[in-house]
Image: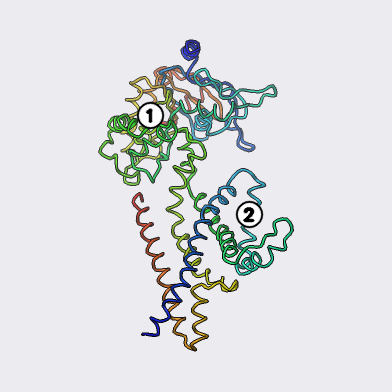
């Protein structure tokens, strides 16, 4: 019944995370975090290092498994608490199918060094989706033009600057046509003069109404591009507000202290 | 000079035995070594420990002993006791032994690949086997070329051990002529044959390394 699935997808949020708990050994990194992302929203997650913001992002697409809580992606349950309050994931194949709707961009790019720029973009559609190279080529070339790296299509990643690498990584993620894009500190490993080109590409994506969750230290990006800003500290979600209100009148004292320290 | 030409025939025949053992061993031990390395890196602790034990056994005893054991003692082992002809016995011993060394080379190579490569593949939807085939192993090949070159050159020379099974490899052919003619010239010619083989291997690996260096 496709009509019903469509209806569910329309009404349910892109990401629904409830009471997410995650510990590494004795250290509890996420202490029951809840977060909802609506379609087309661009949410910036900010907070001091060690606040759990990257871990939260990595929990959403199964790079880390959660200990407790509920994760629903576009209406499909990824994990939910069992009777004893421990998170149980759905079957592996289902996890992979659901997580494929989320593209991810890493702090350290994680490009495949043995493949050229174009091959990096084409690899997943061909291997994972089973598409013919010729079928994906126009789309891949269009994406490379979009991130301004069409002329580098045959270069290997080692020949690129950090900013160029990150733009290839964005194109690579988009080639799988994700519904949601997750960014894990995408500019933190870049020289300051190279962050601009990556942020421009991300802003362009936001203008096209891509649903985005961005863990970042770039306050300028959070202020200007994000529709909502979330502040995390000590494994808890402290405050969530529309971007303008967040910077104009932060409610929580810890948010204010953090914003003051950033200036 | 005429003498050297006259012994080239029998030495070349011996070289064929040597080369045959060399290539068949490689063809069997490389895939077996890769399989062992993957099992050793897997989450299945029992299988991983078993591979550990296997590698310890194979690296911890002389290849000569393994050769003698498989040819002479295997027929008397209960259950699996089979009598192998000399050349197949040599192949089995060499393949099992070299697989253990190759497994360690592969393991080191696989473990040297950054975790980010696995994560990058995972978020794009790659399964584990797709990640290994398309992303990890192609990068491993490049990193293990130097140790693999080392190991295959050792294999060329190790083949001479099969004289204990009375197989007429290059070295045994040379020794036969030395004992017949009371001259050491055959040994020198045999050395030339071995050097030629390792020279070809060295050159081949250099070319491979160069080809894989394009993405440095």
Q: Quadrant of the N terminus of chain B?
A: bottom left
Query: Which residue is labeled 2 in the image?
Result: B52
Does A124 sit above or below residue B4? above
- Residue named by callout 1: A174
Alpha-carbon distance for marks 2 and 1?
Answer: 42 Å
- The part of the image, by quadrant, that contains residue B195 is bottom left
**Which of the chains bears the disc numbered 1?**
A
Q: Nearer the viewer, mark 2 or mark 1?
A: 2
Residue closer to the observer: B2 or A122? B2
Find residue B118 and report its horizontal and vertical position in percent: 49, 40
Q: Quadrant of residue A183?
A: top left
**Residue at 53% in and 24% down:** A237
Q: Residues within 10 Å of mark 1 (few under 14, many from 20)?
A: many
What SS does tag 1 mark?
Answer: helix
Foreground: B170 or A190?
Answer: B170
The residue closer to the viewer here, B205 or B73, is: B73
Residue A81 in percent (x, y) is at 64, 23
Q: Residue furthest left?
A: A151
Q: Position of residue A151 (x, y in %)?
A: 25, 38
Chain holding disc 2: B
Residue A136 position in % (x across, y down): 34, 31
State the SS at label 2: helix
Please name whichever residue, B10 or A262, is drawn nearer the observer in this view of the structure: B10
Q: Farthest residue toward the bottom?
A: B182
Q: Residues within 10 Å of mark 2 (few under 14, many from 20)?
A: some
Residue at 67%, 60% (x, y): give it.
B82
Q: Which mark is residue B191?
A: none
Q: Please check whether the numbered discs 2 and 1 fall on a single chain.
A: no
């Amino acid at each position: 019944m496709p009509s019903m699935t469509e209806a569910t997808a329309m009404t349910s949020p892109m990401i629904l995370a409830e009471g997410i708990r995650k510990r590494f050994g004795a250290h509890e990194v996420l202490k029951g975090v809840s977060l909802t992302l609506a379609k087309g929203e661009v949410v910036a997650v900010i907070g001091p290092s060690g606040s759990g913001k990257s871990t939260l992002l990595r929990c959403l697409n199964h790079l880390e498994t959660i200990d407790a809580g509920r994760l629903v992606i576009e209406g499909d349950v990824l994990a939910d608490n069992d009777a004893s309050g421990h998170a149980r994931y759905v079957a592996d194949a289902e996890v992979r199918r659901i997580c494929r709707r989320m593209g991810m961009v890493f702090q350290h790019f994680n490009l495949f060094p043995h493949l050229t720029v174009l091959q990096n973009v084409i690899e997943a559609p061909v291997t994972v989706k089973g598409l013919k190279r010729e079928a994906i080529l126009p789309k891949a070339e269009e994406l490379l033009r979009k991130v301004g790296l069409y002329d580098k299509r045959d270069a290997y990643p080692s020949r690129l600057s950090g900013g160029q690498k990150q733009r290839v990584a964005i194109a690579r993620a988009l080639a799988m046509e994700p519904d949601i894009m997750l960014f894990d500190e995408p500019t933190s490993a870049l020289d300051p003069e190279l962050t601009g080109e990556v942020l421009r590409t991300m802003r362009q994506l936001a203008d096209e109404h891509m649903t985005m969750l961005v863990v970042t230290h770039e306050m300028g990006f959070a202020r200007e591009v994000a529709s909502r800003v979330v502040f995390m500290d000590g494994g808890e979600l402290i405050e969530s507000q529309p971007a303008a209100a967040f910077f104009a009148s932060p409610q929580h004292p810890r948010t204010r202290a953090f914003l003051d320290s950033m200036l | 000079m005429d003498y050297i030409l006259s012994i080239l025939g029998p030495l070349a025949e011996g070289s064929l035995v040597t080369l045959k053992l060399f290539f068949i061993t490689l063809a069997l031990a490389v895939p077996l070594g890769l399989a062992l390395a993957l099992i050793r890196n897997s989450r299945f602790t029992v299988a991983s420990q078993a591979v550990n034990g296997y590698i310890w056994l194979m690296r911890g005893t002389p290849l000569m002993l393994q050769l003698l054991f498989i040819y002479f003692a295997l027929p008397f082992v209960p259950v699996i006791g089979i009598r192998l002809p000399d050349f197949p016995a040599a192949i089995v011993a060499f393949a099992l032994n070299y697989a253990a060394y190759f497994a360690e080379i592969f393991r080191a190579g696989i473990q040297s690949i950054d975790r980010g490569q696995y994560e990058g593949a995972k978020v794009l939807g790659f399964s584990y086997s797709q990640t290994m085939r398309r992303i990890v192993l192609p990068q491993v090949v490049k990193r293990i070329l130097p140790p693999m070159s080392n190991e295959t050159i050792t294999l060329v020379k190790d083949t001479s051990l099969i004289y204990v099974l009375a197989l007429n490899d290059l070295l045994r052919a040379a020794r036969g002529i030395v004992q017949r003619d009371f001259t050491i010239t055959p040994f020198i010619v045999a050395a030339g044959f071995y050097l030629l083989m390792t020279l070809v291997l060295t050159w081949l690996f250099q070319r491979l390394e160069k080809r894989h260096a394009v993405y440095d």
